[in-house]
Image (spheres, rainbow, N blue to C red):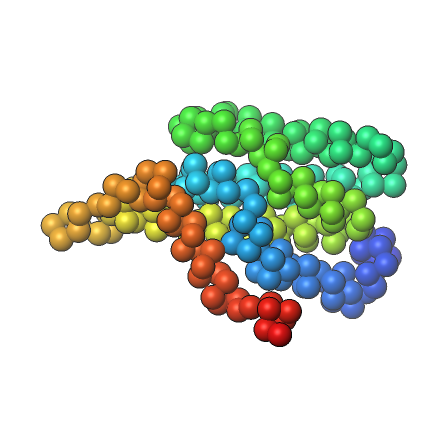
């Protein structure tokens, strides 16, 4: 078992998750360098599908699935993929996982598939997924690449869920179809379920993340 773990983690060592690199990678992707709130990547879906919390959760799950799967396969094939065609191979791998998730939705959750429309398919061009495959999975062992994909997917999904939560709550007074803010005393803010509301919500989430996280070391100087 130890030998197998070391092979998966490469030169990471045997203490902790990938010799301690796993926890660092997890924190980096999910919090320190959050792809949506800090790097401001993948904002198209953050603006387009977050008018409902359910949509946000499914889109977040899609990105986790694609990011983890593509990172794993890219890492496994990194020593066998010619450098000149690496990006073509990465796109093909990412597209495979996107198609699998898209077909799953169409088979079992038709209504959700219709609500998300083309945005699941557009994960193929999501710079978060492509960026992690190119910048991380191509240079790191499989286990650590899985952690990186999971971390960035979770970081994106949590930020997306926060946006979807507040947009649905303030825009309709409901959460997942259940009334929370009674119409007797709350008038739904229709702006929050429209495109401008998405920009406001995204801006507030980015501001909140940066306020809690604090300035970078070089910014303090």
Task: Between residue 72 and residue 192, name the one nearer to us.
Answer: 192
Task: Between residue 27 and residue 16, name the one nearer to us.
Answer: 27
Using the rendered image of the protein, determine whether residue 163 is visible from the camera's viewpoint.
no
The residue drawn where x is 74% and y is 49% is 136
Query: Where is residue 2 shown, x and y percent of the image?
Result: 83, 60
Which residue is outermost to the front?
221
Q: Is residue 212 above or below residue 66?
A: below
Count of numbered tags? 0
Residue 191 in the figure: left or right of residue 151: left
Which residue is outermost to the left?
184
Residue 40 in the figure: left or right of residue 77: left
The residue drawn where x is 78% and y is 68% is 15
Using the rendered view, name the quadrant where residue 42 is placed: top right
Using the rendered image of the protein, determine whether residue 74 is visible from the camera's viewpoint.
yes
Q: Quadrant of the C terminus?
A: bottom right
Residue 196 in the figure: left or right of residue 187: right
Q: Is residue 92 above or below residue 199?
A: above
Using the rendered view, name the quadrant where residue 207 is placed: bottom left
Query: Where is residue 124 shown, x and y percent of the image?
Result: 62, 32
The residue drawn where x is 47% and y is 47% is 160
Residue 59 in the figure: left or right of residue 193: right
Q: Is residue 103 above or below residue 62?
A: above
Q: Quadrant of the N terminus?
A: bottom right
């Amino acid at each position: 078992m130890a030998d197998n773990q070391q092979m998966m983690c490469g030169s990471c060592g045997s203490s902790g998750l990938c010799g301690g690199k796993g926890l660092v990678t997890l924190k980096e992707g999910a919090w320190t360098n959050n792809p949506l709130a800090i790097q401001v990547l993948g904002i198209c879906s953050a603006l387009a599908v977050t008018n409902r919390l359910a949509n946000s959760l499914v889109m977040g799950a899609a990105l986790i699935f694609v990011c983890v799967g593509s990172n794993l396969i890219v890492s496994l094939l990194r020593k066998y993929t010619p450098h000149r065609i690496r990006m073509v191979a990465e796109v093909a791998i990412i597209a495979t996982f996107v198609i699998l998730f898209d077909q799953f939705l169409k088979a079992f959750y038709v209504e959700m598939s219709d609500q998300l429309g083309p945005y699941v398919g557009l994960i193929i061009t999501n710079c978060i997924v492509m960026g992690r495959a190119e910048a991380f999975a191509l240079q790191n062992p499989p286990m650590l690449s899985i952690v990186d994909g999971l971390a960035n997917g979770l970081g994106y999904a949590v930020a997306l869920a926060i946006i979807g939560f507040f947009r649905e709550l303030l825009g309709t007074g409901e959460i997942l179809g259940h009334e929370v803010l009674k119409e007797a005393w709350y008038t739904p803010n229709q702006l929050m379920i429209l495109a401008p509301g998405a920009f406001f919500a995204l801006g507030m989430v980015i501001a909140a993340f940066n306020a809690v996280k604090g300035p970078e070391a070089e910014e303090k100087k």
